[in-house]
Image (spheres, rainbow, N blue to C red):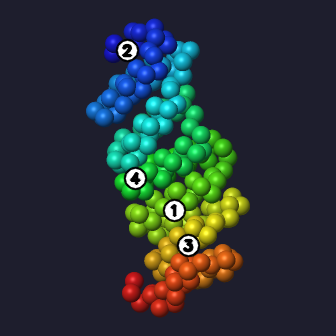
Amino acid sequence: GALRALAPGSLAPDAVGALLHSATQKGDLGLLREVCHCASNGSNALPTTACEALLRSRASVGDGNGVEIFDTLVQAGFEPHESTLTAVVSMCAESKHVPLAEHIVAHARRAHGRVLLPLYSALIKVYGQARMWHKTCDLYASMKLEGVVPDTVAYGALIKAAVESGRTELAQELFRESGNPDLLNYMSLIRAAGGRGRQ
């Protein structure tokens, strides 16, 4: 389109941000790619603030194009900080946008060689909202492999997932490992002892 005819770097950051927003609101991935192409070929990289806001908004509404939008921005040179990735995955919880959350975590693992606790915790929250208890439990194995130790909140969510999926032994293992069980963990364990009949 017309944007590709513009000189590289000729779009002001504010214009890039507005065009990115417009393209995603319309679901126009072609325009999104043109904006990214035009911006990334210039001396000015994609405006970080606009990209971050764009990803948050797409995550919060559960945009079905979210994965492709994320990849398009990254391919155009956008390098999201881990805090941004964590925030976007957290936004995926309310919209239950599991594919985008999983894609971002996989990106973080490729880009940084590991996933840190805040990002794991955000994905646990997404799985919890989507009631994907088995997937939550499976995350615990990945965390152990990467040497990531859950905090109290993560332990509570993992124990609840183990209880909900009927994995009582895992719930008890998590309860023991937590070392400092709070009331939520305690109540989850009580439910694990008598709740399997409900499943």
Residue at far left of view:
26
Using the rendered image of the protein, determine whether residue 33 is visible from the camera's viewpoint: no
Do the residues under discs 1 and 4 have CB atoms within 8 angstroms?
A: no
Label 2: which secondary element:
helix
> Where, quadrant-wise, is the N terminus in this rendering?
top left
Between discs 2 and 3, the one toward the N terminus = 2
Corner quadrant of residue 130:
bottom left
Q: Amino acid at mark 2?
A: Leu
Q: Which residue is mark 1?
A: 124
**Which numbered tag is attached to residue 97?**
4
Q: Residue at x 34, y 34 (%)?
A: 24
Q: Residue at x 46, y 8 (%)?
A: 7
Q: Position of residue 85 (x, y in %)?
A: 54, 45
Task: Answer few, some or many: residues within 10 Å of disc 2's Cα (few below 14, many 20 plus, some between 14 and 19).
Answer: some
Q: Which residue is mark 2?
A: 3
Spatial CA distance of label 4 from label 2 is: 31 Å
Q: Which residue is mark 3?
A: 156
Do the residues under discs 2 and 3 have CB atoms within 8 angstroms?
A: no
Spatial CA distance of label 2 from label 1 is: 40 Å
